[in-house]
Amino acid sequence: MRLFPILVERELGPRSVTRDAVRGDPRVFPVTDDDKRAWRDRTRAARRGLDDGYRVDASEALSHAVGTLASRLRDCGDRALAAYVPIGREPGSTAMLDAAMRAGVTVLLPIAGDPGPMSWAHYTGPDSLVPARHGLLEPSGPVLPPDTIGDAAVILVPALAVDRRGGRLGRGAGFYDRTLHLAAPDAWLVGVVYDDLVDRLPTEGHDVRMTHVLTPGGGLRPLPLE
């Protein structure tokens, strides 16, 4: 697998995304709290306060960024990108999956089953998604083994927050922490958030650090950040 060149700012961000209508900023948290549950509660509460107009603008910015990223993958000979189907108030929409597919790369989506690494399936369009366990939407096609994630040059990982060191706060189920060790050593692990980039999150030994963060307002940035 070949890593493609760092994407320049004019291609992947920052985009023009305004938070003027946001009733709460998920970036403003104490950084001394080591209680993951408290962080999750505060972040979810902040997301519930996000204005619908901002969320639409944010989804458009993320779709643009993912489409550009997928085009670079294709041009460099890397054919697979792993992503997720946003649920609830997670950042993004299926439009970012469509943008990646139109760019000509294989889009892998997770299949969350029993405890253990997640399986995968190909995304072929919104009509291929069906309701699944845990309130998720998953592809209806053939299920691929967990080590399929090793084919992905970039893995988009949903997060409640990401810190400047690469720490990620997930929803607490541990699916990604049990799966990302199967990724290729040089794969980009991209935490996708709104603008929930904080100084420091509580982390544990099993937590997998992100190599990049993608936000609507800041674009794609490598981690750690100074």
Image (spheres, grey):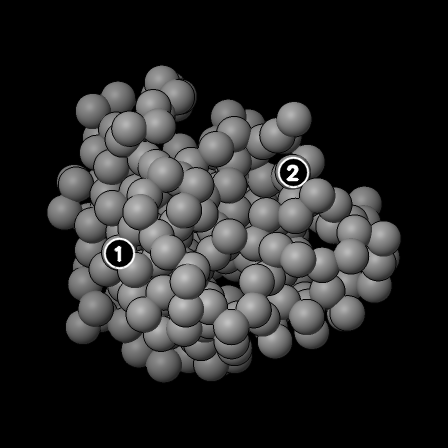
Alpha carbon of mark 1 to alpha carbon of mark 2: how far?
Answer: 24 Å
Residue beneath the point at 35% across and 74% down: 52
On screen, residue 73 above or below 139: above
Camera-side residue of 156 and 182: 156
Give the left or right position of residue 75, taking residue 36 as reference.
left
Which SS class for mark 1?
Answer: helix
For label 1, the residue is: 60
Camera-side residue of 14 and 11: 14
Q: Position of residue 49 (x, y in %)?
A: 51, 76
Which three-letter amino acid code belongs to the residue tagged 2?
A: Arg
Q: Position of residue 10 (x, y in %)?
A: 28, 28
Splitting the image into 4 quarters, where does residue 128 fall? Answer: bottom left
Alpha-carbon neighbours of circle 1 within 10 Å: few (<14), some, or many (≥20)? Answer: some
Which of marks 2 and 1 precedes in the sequence? 1
Alpha-carbon neighbours of circle 2 within 10 Å: few (<14), some, or many (≥20)? Answer: some
For label 2, the residue is: 164
On screen, residue 49 above or below 209: below
On screen, residue 211 above or below 35: above
Q: Position of residue 9 (x, y in %)?
A: 35, 28
